[in-house]
Image (cartoon, rainbow, N blue to C red):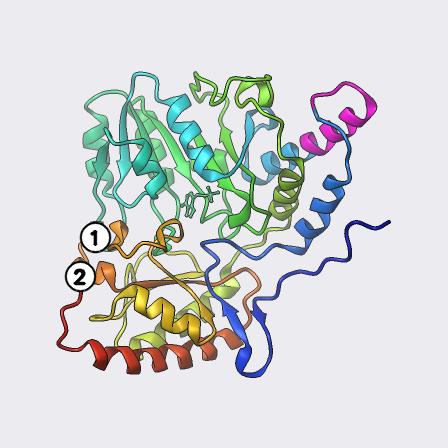
Amino acid sequence: MTLLGPVAPVPSRKGRGSHVRYYLDANASEPLRPQAYEAVPEALRATGNPSSVHREGRAARRILEDARETVATRFGALPERVVFTSGATEANAFALHALRGGRRLIVGATEHDLIRAHAPDAAVLAVDRRGVVELDVLEFMLDEGPALVALMLANNETGTLQPVAEAAALCRRHGGILHVDTVQAAGRLPVDLGVLGAHSLALSSHKLGGPLGAGALLLTADAPAERPLIAGGGQERGWRGGTPALPAIAGFAAAAEALGDADRLAPMRDAIEEAAVREGAIVCGAGVARLANTTCLALPGVRADAQVIALDLDGIAVSAGAACSSGKVTASHVLTAMGLGMLAGQAIRVSLPWNAEADCVEAFADAYARMAARLRPALAGAAVDA
Ligand code: PLP
């Protein structure tokens, strides 16, 4: 009996005629890559626990260690310093937990909520109007004593890139430790722990075209990791107890191996920005190095959630602010940190998936023009709650 039928990759566009939908929310979750589609059922068929010593256990262990080797090679780490987790929320929490020691914590003002939630006592490193951290301020903060610094390589809302390699050099010069959340950059830019010079980096499978439920923390040989995240059965070299999610990890590694770069998406992203600007939008974080697939578009006077709903009803899936908080109607802390005031509650994120096709530009432009025409007059003069 075949339990798993044939599988097919998810297209970036779905449906026919007026029911066509365009998925432009890749920073929330990328569509699965075909290589991951193949690796997941293969791993599901493996019977056995990777910790067992019998033949079935050893076969499962091989899948796990092959995946570790692939992820290590792809992202410039040693296999024995790759710790698989359930995702990047866990990998980032693990880094803050394991690397903290007695150090002070410094986090970028536009870090993901999960970093901010784990670091209520952290000193916040401000960003400029384009969303880039100020390195001379970081150097000043590092002068005050040993610190663990958490910075993201690419911002999930604006795509803005941080000068991570420069920050890593500063940290090393001042005896600090740098942890980098590379979740949104991996798969869109080359990401290599050694080249970045940081001490650790966090990855998420579903943000690079693998399945949900896997991620990893990669540590350099000199990262002073002290405490396991979960004590338990000694899995992951004692760093994280619990039987690893083999199918998700196998899919994660297959997707990681298949990554290209996202440069081909930049012309589509630029055309989407031009179309939105024609309707009165402002591009948040324009003018700095950004991810090729991401744009953050503020439409003055129109609440972000109203824009998202209108576009959704018109066949376009985008989000307001961070994916993890898209159910909330609050101003984006990222845009607020960039000094955008009311606009922080009026911006949507458009993030093109790895398999986006050129026709999404026209579809977006038409839907955006209809949305702007409908919502702007309706809200003109009304109090807009940012
Ligand atoms: N880091 C960044 C920059 C993200 O955008 C997200 C998710 O939105 C995460 C971490 C969390 O990743 P995961 O869903 O794997 O927990």
Q: Is residue 133 left or right of residue 247?
A: left
For residue 284, what is the image quadrant?
bottom left
What's the CA distance linking mark 2 and mark 1?
8 Å
Q: Is mark 2 within 8 Å of ligand 1?
A: no
Which residue in the structure is indicated by mark 1? 336
Q: x and y percent of residue 112 in the render?
A: 34, 43
Task: Report the magenta residues as a range.
Answer: 51-65
Q: Majority secondary structure of the magenta segment?
A: helix
Q: Is residue 178 left or right of residue 316?
A: left
Q: x and y percent of residue 126 in the render?
A: 21, 43
For residue 269, what is the image quadrant?
bottom left
Residue at position x 46%, y 37% in the image: 202
Q: x and y percent of residue 141 in the render?
A: 20, 30
Give the vertical position of 286 relative to 37 (above or below): below
Give the class, few, some or many, for how many residues have Cα within 10 Å of label 1's Cα (few <14, many ≥20).
some
N-terminal of the two: label 2 or label 1? Answer: 1
Residue 362 lies within the magenta run: no
Helix, strand or loop for disc 1 = helix
Residue at position x 61%, y 43% in the image: 252
Q: From this viewpoint, is residue 110 visible?
A: yes
Q: Is residue 280 left or right of residue 322?
A: left
Give the vertical position of 159 relative to 45 (above or below): below
Question: Which quadrant of the rendered structure holds the C terminus?
Answer: bottom left
Residue 57 lies within the magenta run: yes
Q: From this viewpoint, is residue 199 visible?
A: no
Which residue in the structure is indicated by mark 2? 342
Q: x and y percent of residue 84 in the render?
A: 56, 32
Query: Which of 5 and 177 lies nearest the eye of the viewer?
Result: 5
Query: Which of 379 and 60 lies nearest the eye of the viewer?
Result: 379
